[in-house]
Image (spheres, coloured by chain):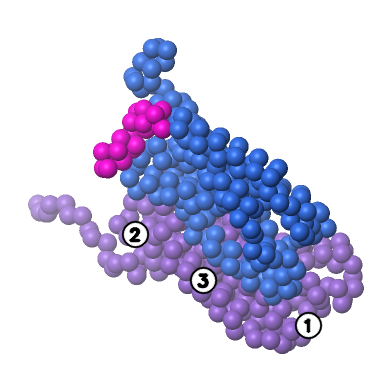
Chain colours: A purple, B blue
Amino acid sequence: MSHVGPLTLREPRGGLGVAVVATLRRDMTLKLRRRSEVMNPLVFFALVITLFPLGVAPESKLLSTIAPGLLWVAALLATLLSLDSLFRVDFDDGSLEQMMLSHQPLAMLVLPKVAAHWLLTGLPLALMAPLLGVLLSLPAGSYGVLSLSLALGSASLSLVGAIGAALTVGVSRGGVLLSLLVLPLYIPVLIFGTGAIQAAIAGSGVAPHLAMLGAMLAAALMLAPWAIAASLRISLNG
Amino acid sequence: MWRIIHQLGSPKGFYTLSARLQPWVWAAAALLMLIGGLWGLLYAPADYQQGDSFRIIYVHVPAAFLAQSIFVGLAVAAVVFLVWKIKVADMAASVMAPFGAGMTFVALFSGAVWGVPTWGTWWVWDARLTSMLILLFLYIGIIALRGAYAHRDSGSRAASVLAIVGVINIPIIKYSVEWWNTLHQPATFSITERPAMPAEMWLPLLLMVVGFYCFCIALTLMRTRNEILRRESSKRWVRDLVRGQ
């Protein structure tokens, strides 16, 4: 007769670090399995940029002056478009509730989710932007800054946007509401993002603009997770 | 002191205390706005450059003051509601947000009307105008978010979080918009560098500003009382109150 010992709860191995890495890996895997969700913002970005020469005028001189703003606004809208799905699937299938119940702080667990969003939306947009810059005859010498400013700025956009996504995830058809909440908060990032490219074109210093983008990212990294976690708790209770 | 704060925290205490306070605030608001308005519109000297069109300042500046103060008030109420779970704070916030949005609109509209005779245009992308417009969008976002939730308590808490996020962002938005404006073009019009006004001009303005604040407090008290009655309509003291009348 085999002896059955008392039932013991197995402590999950590893601490916060393991949980964060596991969440990042899980989110990346899930997102990569839904290819269209990764591709759609990129296609949207390209499409919106295609519309402007048709709507404004196909003159390369005019286009090159408005290119920094166009590229940034289009990338910003593409990010916004992808935000709605950030927590939606996890909200629908109950994974978010499991995350909330886990004994790791929710604010730390949302950080890898936002990071996954940036890695598969903001970063690809930043890498694709120079191609579209060629279409808009963006002056040479500003392509590197375009990518860099988009990469830095879109990380802040993901973090701030995640607050809006968390607030509206419990609301049915929250898409338009999400853009109403988030777009005013995007304005500083837009200003310094386009400012960096314009400074690069004018030949003046790029560093202050990029430094401001970095400062905003640092502030967002510090504060946004708490707001996201608080918002998710509200959405899950409502 | 603490007793008064505790009393303010409960809906019933707020209701009785505000009943005593309300007439005085209304009277102060009416008196200040009447004197300030008449003085400013009829007796203050006309501006040597702008003529009589400058008198719009007596509506424009108080409205702009309130538009910004109410947003800070919203955030303070949000913190009080989220931290200490004081429902009256949220009720006040829910009635303050539409009023703040209205004041922002008044400031923008009166500014546009003022812009026509002085600047020759309804709108310029000046830093101050732009940040006021963004403030209006922030207000609308808070009002819309509160309304979007089916469950009222969740809507209250979501609007509170957004108000706090907004108030942290307002200085960032304000300074970045100023930076943007100076980058693109030198300031064509500067509202801040007005020639120093004589006392006959700014005294009525001061009266109007204080009057507008009193009006805001009085209206918030009144509408919060209504909100208390609506939300606490199942409580016994509200029923007794309604039956007693």
Mark 1 nearby-residue class (10 Å; few <14, some 14–19, many ≥20):
some
Q: Which residue is mark 2?
A: A105
The amino acid type of the residue labelled 2 equals Pro
Q: Main secondary structure of the magenta part?
A: helix
Q: Nearer the viewer, residue A113 or B80?
A: B80
What is the number of the mark on residue A139?
1
Left or right of A30, for residue A10: left
Question: Could you say where residue B168 lies in the image, as x and y percent from the top left?
Answer: 49, 60
Indicate the position of residue B184 as horizontal and vertical percent values. Answer: 73, 73
Disc 1, SS? loop
Task: Residue A154: give its label.
Answer: none
| Distance (Cα) linking label 3 and label 2 | 21 Å
Q: Which residue is mark 3?
A: A217
What residue span does the magenta drawing correspond to?
B1-21
Q: Residue at x 60, y 39 (%)?
A: B35
The answer to whether residue A189 is visible is no
Q: Secondary structure at mark 2?
A: loop
Residue drawn at point x = 45 percent, y = 36 percent: B91
